[in-house]
Image (tube, grey):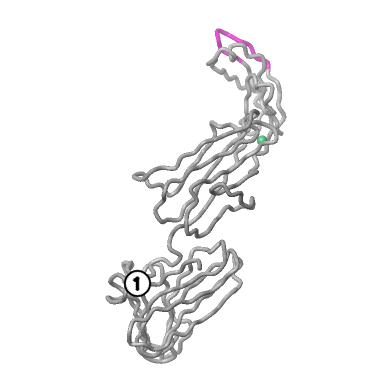
Amino acid sequence: MRALALAALVASAPMALAQKVLVRAAGGKWVPVAAKQVDGRIEFALDATLLAGGKGTIVIDPPSWMKLDDEQPPEVTGFALDGQPRELKGPFDLGHVARPPSKVEITFADRDNPLDPASLLVRVEPSYPDRPQSEHRFTGGADRKQGTVVVTLPELPQDSYRVLVAVADASPQVNRQRVEVRFSTLPLILNGSFEQVTAEGKAANWSFGTWSSNAETKYKMEVVEGGVAGRRALRMEGLAGSLNMVCSQTTYDVTSGGEFVVTGSYRTDGGCGLSILAYDAGGKELLYDTRGLKPTKQWTAFREEFKVPPNARVVIAPRSGSKGVSWFDDLKMVPK
Ligand SMILES: [Ca+2]
Ligand SMILES: [Ca+2]
């Protein structure tokens, strides 16, 4: 029989009095191992056949409160934003928020062992090293089987954020629970003023195409100088054939649902429009609404309202089906 001998250095006084050495054998059973102390070290031999795949966990003098067989990570028992308790159903994706939370509180509880504050991991991504950083603290009950992590967020630049909080129980298995809270403070329509242009000269964040065409279809869609905000605007020109020119963008999920307003400016020779589409997580169409915009030679503001259920994926599509030139600029979408 092959035996694997390990020696553990004694680092503290209680260890020097080691009474009990246990190894977690294949199948999860804890098996006591004979140990002796030699010159301030604990020595014991391990029977390799006890271990699963040559790996095992050794515990020396576990405290009396420790439940060695614990394989369950702590549970999430509370979630609050800015002091307001929220539903406990993950994933904790807040979607687009007009104002980011300044305090995220997550309560963990473990049935068998205390939570280990030293295992606590809190990360806010992306991070802005030059800006004030988030802070966190951990408060636990007397037996520490329950604890709350409070993350205080500084004022954050517009971005799409992930707050990661992970904590483990104080068990030999180190069972870890992770919670990710996501939210976005980016504008719901990105590059709505058509100022950012890709290396290919296309408007960033937007898709271009026709939603129907025939052999004679001829059109031009581009971002050029002009408009009412910034320096550039979207210009679409119908030249020939069947015309159904569409520029579209899928917004960040509007997790909250509710009423929204899309505003912008346009001008058009032959008429244009704005389509608002919404889909659920499975891709089922929830809304397909096209608002017509009448011909006008002057830049003219428009405002369209719509309503979607929670967790809708919204597509905003300025479009034109007419000959001649249509322009769009300064598109914005906000909760009503
Ligand atoms: Ca546990
Ligand atoms: Ca612009």
In percent of the image, x 56 and y 72: which residue is there? 307
Q: Is residue 42 magenta?
A: yes
In percent of the image, x 38 and y 91: which residue is there? 240
As helix, strand or loop, the secondary structure at mark 1 comes to loop
Name which quarter of the figure residue 129 lies in.
top left
Q: Nearer the viewer, residue 204 or 157?
A: 157
Read off the magenta span: 34-43
Residue 26 in sight:
yes
- Above or below, 96 against 173 in this view is below
- Above or below, 176 against 20 in this view is below
Q: Is residue 47 magenta?
A: no
Q: Is residue 272 left or right of residue 31?
A: left
**Amino acid identity at mark 1:** Lys
Q: Nearer the viewer, residue 70 or 101?
A: 101
Q: Quadrant of the N terminus?
A: top right
- Above or below, 238 against 135 in this view is below
Q: Would you name the residue on which mark 1 appears? A: 202
Q: x and y percent of residue 272 in the render?
A: 42, 85
Q: x and y percent of residue 262 in the render?
A: 46, 73
Q: Nearer the viewer, residue 214 or 280?
A: 280
